[in-house]
Image: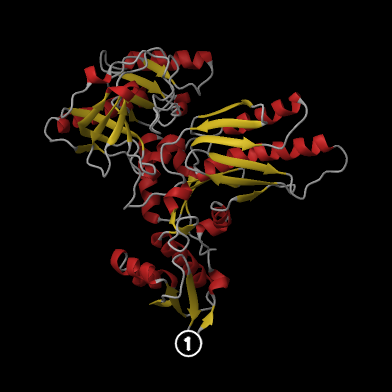
Amino acid sequence: MAILEDDRLVELLVDRPDARRSVGDIYLGRVEAVLPGIQAAFVDIGAEKSAFLHASDLVEDEDEDDPSEPGDEDDESGDGNGNGGGRGRSRRRLPNVADELKRGESKLVQVIKEPISTKGSRVTAQVSLAGRFLVYMPFASRVGVSRKIEGREQRTRLRELVGRLVPKDEGGWIIRTVADDLTEDRCKREIDHLLGIWKKIKRKAGSVRPPALLQRETSLTRGIVRDLFSDKVDSLLVDSRQLHNEISQYLSQIDPELQQRVHLYRDETPLFDEYDIEAEIRGLFQQRVELPTGGYLIIQPTEALTSIDVNTGRYTGKKDPESTILRTNLEAAREVARQLRLRDIGGIIVVDFIDMETRGNRDKVLQELRTHLGRDRARTKAFAVSELGLIEMTRQRVRPSLLQSMTEACPSCSGTGRVFRPEVVVRRMERSLKRAGADHKERQLAVRLHPDVALYLLEQEPNFLRQLEKATGLELEVRDDPMMRLDEFRMMAKPAGRDVTELYAVA
């Protein structure tokens, strides 16, 4: 799924059946270890690695009157183990984890951060259930309004509306940003729906042995429609009839007026090609990012942080060097904010802008960066320019970046580079073959692949060729070739054996 703003790609969301997103999933876990020294516990939820539960996630933050929505938390304080240490709530007095949890006991928890690198999931005991307009928190006790709803009268109206309709002593509620024009009827329907889900979860928790999955978060598509699709979005294009029907059915329940903005894409040209998204995706994995006037960024992820360097490149301006530098830095600030969203980079980020002499110019660049970071769904903080001329910032991390999730260490270079996974190579090959089919110039193609990719295709996607032949009208043949690189494929036109890879391949 791709999200475009001003005709440019700003977010790319990937979900696969074998590696689906887990943030929002609710488990009945079993406490495996309690560690008072770091005020945390490890909980077995049935995953490969135990989940991390910090003391700050055992209790509700009663002091915060304007809560953020789920997925909006600040998660950058640390516990020394690289696990966040309290979602920005370190000012509260925390309970002693040894008093709250005992080894071997059952605990209801919800995933708030996916496994990243060597670390397991991050979980919270403060469960929340998200609806279209409201978020239900069974263990809280207040009605809050999303901080993104700014009008004082509107905030008061919504708080009073929800406060009047929710049952007493039935937990807390957050009114979401899209609830601007919430009616009493819709509000009551959603309250009943969320309370019903919670009752099912409690019933299931009482009848299973830990570790057990109690409630899976909704699919990526449905979650994005629920959280983002509003009258501020011009259109939603879908190239799958099945998915289009599913979205239309879902919208008929939550917001029928938006159905006219959903369109089934039927053109022969692949949807991502039509909107030039493939070209943007290619740049996702490059270190160098070009700026409009000739400057460029160098983005380098490391284990501890991500460094971003700004350079003027071929842009030298005409007269005043300070104005040249300012213009490049302002362009860079806008592109840095976009690239962080696009690559889904989280944690600590350090940006080395070109040195500026005047404090006023430094403040302009910082303000430009903060303005564009305001569009980001993930919580971000950009701090003042340091004495070394660096801007340090943090961005909420709930899952691995696209670089981590879509690439793996290259066996040819001992991990100093990256290559695409076999499933990604197959997807690139699929898109290339669809492009060849749409061109109607070839009838028979032989595809040469590395043996590992061919084996993946044989074992994991045995119907791939048959389905693709039907979709493209091409006669296809796959050959394994040990001389190919792991992330390489070649397309040969039959019977002449002409190499047509460069004509159709997604680079």
Q: Residue at x 74, y 45 (%)?
A: 312
* Residue 103 vertical placement versus 209 (above, below): above
Residue, far right: 319
Q: Residue at x 58, y 31 (%)?
A: 392
Percent x, y of residue 116: 39, 42
Q: Is residue 151 visible?
A: yes
Q: Is residue 374 visible?
A: no
* Residue 148 vertical placement versus 407 (above, below): above
Percent x, y of residue 253: 35, 37
Residue 467 sits in which quadrant?
bottom left
Residue, far bottom: 496
Left or right, 241 with respect to 96, comes to: right
Q: Nearer the viewer, residue 18 or 385?
A: 385
Q: Nearer the viewer, residue 495 or 168?
A: 495
Q: Nearer the viewer, residue 100 or 273?
A: 100
State how the image is colored: secondary structure
Q: Residue at x 66, y 30 (%)?
A: 388
Residue 208 sits in which quadrant?
top left
Q: Which residue is mark 1?
A: 495
What amino acid is at disc 1?
Pro
Percent x, y of residue 452: 36, 68
**Numbered disc 1: secondary structure:** loop
